């Protein structure tokens, strides 16, 4: 039994190394060929199609590293990402998901991630794949569609409970407006006794005094008068506790102006501090970019659900290992991959010269 577990870890490291060093589709045959048959195609296939590798499996791999760096100043960041898979057959994983960044539905994988951020380190600590096993007929269009058994917000709260069970040290939970539902915020404050800093949609309504709350006098946050330097106390409709509200106005790369409405449950924070902490949320976007660009998230052509889901786990583990390499070598992710790419080209070039002179 012990030997089997060691072999699994060996395959896990081999497969994740394969993902980080590949620049095309990743398959069992590809890995076996790369290793010149030292690990067979069937071994890799059994590894990917056997046990389900879950968020718990990821935690077991990440835990030693996290324990060595975690502090009370850490933050948990939640966000989801959709990896388009337009040419793969539909199933409970590969199906249509609404992408709020594009404001349209996209066919692909929908992955909900929780990362731990402290100093310059970002570690994945929990994940869930959005599954839609229920098939139904849309009464309006007659089209066959799929839906989930649980909502993303329910999955988020379950992941938070797991992080609490795992005794992860952190001070704040960060999320964008798509995860700032009142049930989530109430759960964070009352069930976990933790604090949050989240974005709010412009149409959320708030009361600026306890009296106004009791009288039902709520105002849209985009209709309020704002101070750029001072956060104001308010009550979000549906919540029984006050928060600090702050509007952040920023300039985008194209010169346009953006507005961000933030809510912070920690009443001892200043406006600038709220902005600074929430900026850490961008780290999860960088993590998703690493998953897609450096860890081959979308590079598995398999059509089998178990292998698809296990490949996602492998990509997450590969991204974690890439982060460890970044810290060790003081290099950015893309620089590490660029170094591998240059080495690969050089090896191919040298091999070509040998063939020409043979």
Image: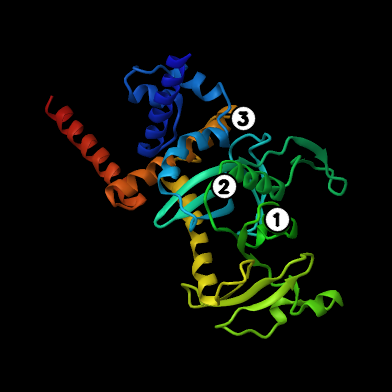
Percent position of residue 100, x then y: 64, 58
From the image, tell me which residue sits under label 3: 305
Nearest to the observer: residue 144 or residue 119: 119
Q: Residue at x 41, y 37 (%)?
A: 24
Q: Quadrant of residue 258?
A: bottom right
Q: Residue at x 50, y 50 (%)?
A: 116
Is 97 located above or below residue 238 in the figure? above
Is 55 located above or below residue 151 in the figure? above
From the image, tell me which residue sits under label 2: 113
- Counting residues from the start of the chain, the first of labels 2 and 3 encountered is 2
Is 231 located above or below residue 52 in the figure? below
The answer to whether any part of residue 292 appears in the image is no
Q: Quadrant of residue 37?
A: top left
Percent position of residue 5, x then y: 46, 20
Tag 3's secondary structure?
helix
Mark 1 vs mark 3, foreground winner is: 1
Quarter holding the C terminus is top left
Q: CA distance from mark 2 to mark 3?
A: 19 Å
Q: Residue at x 58, y 45 (%)?
A: 163
The answer to whether any part of residue 356 appears in the image is yes
- Counting residues from the start of the chain, the first of labels 1 and 3 encountered is 1
Q: Which mark is residue 184?
A: 1
Please rate how many residues cluster around mark 1, counting C-alpha atoms within 10 Å: few if below 14, some from 14 to 19, many from 20: some
Mark 2 vs mark 3, foreground winner is: 2
Nearest to the observer: residue 328 or residue 63: 63
Is 209 located above or below residue 14 in the figure? below
Tag 1's secondary structure?
helix
């Amino acid at each position: 039994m012990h030997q089997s577990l060691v072999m699994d870890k060996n395959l896990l490291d081999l497969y994740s190394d394969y993902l980080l060093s590949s620049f095309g589709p990743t398959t069992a045959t590809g890995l076996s060929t790369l290793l010149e048959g030292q690990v067979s195609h069937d071994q890799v296939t059994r590894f990917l199609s056997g046990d389900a590798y879950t968020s718990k499996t990821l935690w077991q791999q990440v835990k030693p590293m996290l324990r060595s760096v975690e502090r009370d100043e850490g933050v948990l960041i939640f966000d989801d990402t959709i990896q388009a898979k337009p040419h793969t057959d539909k199933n409970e994983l590969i199906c249509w998901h609404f992408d709020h960044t594009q404001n349209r539905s996209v066919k692909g994988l929908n992955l909900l991630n929780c990362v731990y951020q402290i100093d310059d380190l970002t570690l994945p600590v929990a994940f869930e794949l959005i599954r839609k096993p229920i098939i139904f007929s849309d009464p309006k269009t007659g089209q066959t569609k799929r839906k989930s058994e649980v909502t993303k917000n329910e999955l988020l709260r379950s992941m938070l409970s797991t992080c609490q069970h795992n005794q992860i040290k952190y001070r704040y939970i960060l999320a964008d407006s798509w995860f700032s539902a009142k049930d989530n915020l109430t759960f964070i404050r009352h069930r976990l006794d933790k604090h949050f800093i989240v974005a709010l949609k412009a149409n959320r309504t708030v009361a600026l005094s306890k009296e106004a709350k009791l009288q039902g006098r709520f105002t849209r946050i985009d209709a309020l008068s704002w101070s750029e330097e001072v956060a104001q106390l308010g009550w979000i409709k549906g919540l029984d506790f006050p928060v600090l509200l702050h509007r952040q106005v920023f300039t985008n790369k194209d010169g346009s102006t953006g507005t961000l409405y933030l809510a912070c449950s920690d009443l001892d924070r200043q406006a600038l501090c709220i902005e600074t902490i929430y900026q850490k949320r961008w780290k999860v976007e960088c993590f998703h970019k690493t998953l897609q660009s450096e860890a081959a998230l979308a590079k598995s052509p398999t059509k089998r659900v178990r292998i698809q889901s296990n490949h996602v786990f492998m990509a997450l583990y590969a991204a974690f290992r890439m982060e460890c390499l970044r810290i060790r070598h003081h290099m950015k992710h893309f620089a590490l991959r660029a170094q591998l790419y240059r080495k690969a080209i050089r090896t191919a070039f040298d091999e070509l010269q040998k063939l020409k002179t043979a």
